[in-house]
Image: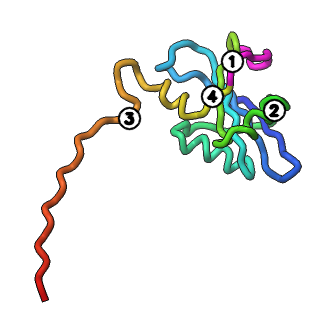
């Protein structure tokens, strides 16, 4: 279960903030702060689950996004960003920049292995001759 919270914006959309444990491939025992902008909380959590983070739930509103975090996610074209809090402390002011979620997906691949599986392209089937009419 992830700690985090949400903030409802004046236009009806929400910004959801989640603190998730760091993937083991990245090393360390810290956490990752993920911000999602969506129409409602359910859609925000669905966006995170579609990235492969299946066991993500939001219980309560213990750590809602700060105004700076809301501004950051609203100005990002994907509306889905992350960063690691300094020293694992989620309440401290971070100097690290926000990153797109694609960067997290690339970082979680084990060293020495590509992030996407490489497969040989399938051979094209020969074209069947058309019957003349």
- Indicate which disc residue 99 carries: 4
Q: Which residue is painted at 23% across and 41% down in the image?
A: 120
Indicate whether 131 appears above or below 87: below
**Which region is colored magenta?**
89-97
Sequence-wise, the earlier of marks 1 and 3 is 1
Indicate whether 90 appears above or below 50: above
Indicate whether 131 appears above or below 23: below
Q: Which residue is mark 3?
A: 116
Sequence-wise, the earlier of marks 4 and 2 is 2
As measured in the structure, the alpha-carbon distance from the residue carrying label 3 to the one carrying label 4 is 20 Å
Is disc 4 surrounded by few (<14), some (14 to 19) or many (20+) residues within 10 Å? some
- Indicate which disc residue 64 carries: 2
Q: Which residue is painted at 51% across and 14% down in the image?
A: 27
Sequence-wise, the earlier of marks 3 and 2 is 2
Q: Position of residue 101 (x, y in %)?
A: 58, 34
Q: Secondary structure at mark 3?
A: loop
Q: Position of residue 25 (x, y in %)?
A: 47, 20
Q: Main secondary structure of the magenta part?
A: loop
Indicate whether 27 appears above or below 45: above
As measured in the structure, the alpha-carbon distance from the residue carrying label 3 to the one carrying label 2 is 33 Å
Residue ranking furthest to the bottom: 133
């Amino acid at each position: 279960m992830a700690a985090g919270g949400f903030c409802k914006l004046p236009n009806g959309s929400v910004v959801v903030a989640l603190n998730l444990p760091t993937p083991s491939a990245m090393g360390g025992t810290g956490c990752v702060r993920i911000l999602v902008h969506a129409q409602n909380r359910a859609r925000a959590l669905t966006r995170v689950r579609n990235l492969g983070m299946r066991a993500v739930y939001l219980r309560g509103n213990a750590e809602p996004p700060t105004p700076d975090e809301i501004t950051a996610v609203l100005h990002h074209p994907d509306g889905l960003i992350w960063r690691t809090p300094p020293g694992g402390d989620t309440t401290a002011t971070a100097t690290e920049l926000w990153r797109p979620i694609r960067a997290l997906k690339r970082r979680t691949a084990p060293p020495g292995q590509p992030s996407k599986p490489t497969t040989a392209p399938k051979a094209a089937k020969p074209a069947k001759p058309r019957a003349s009419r």
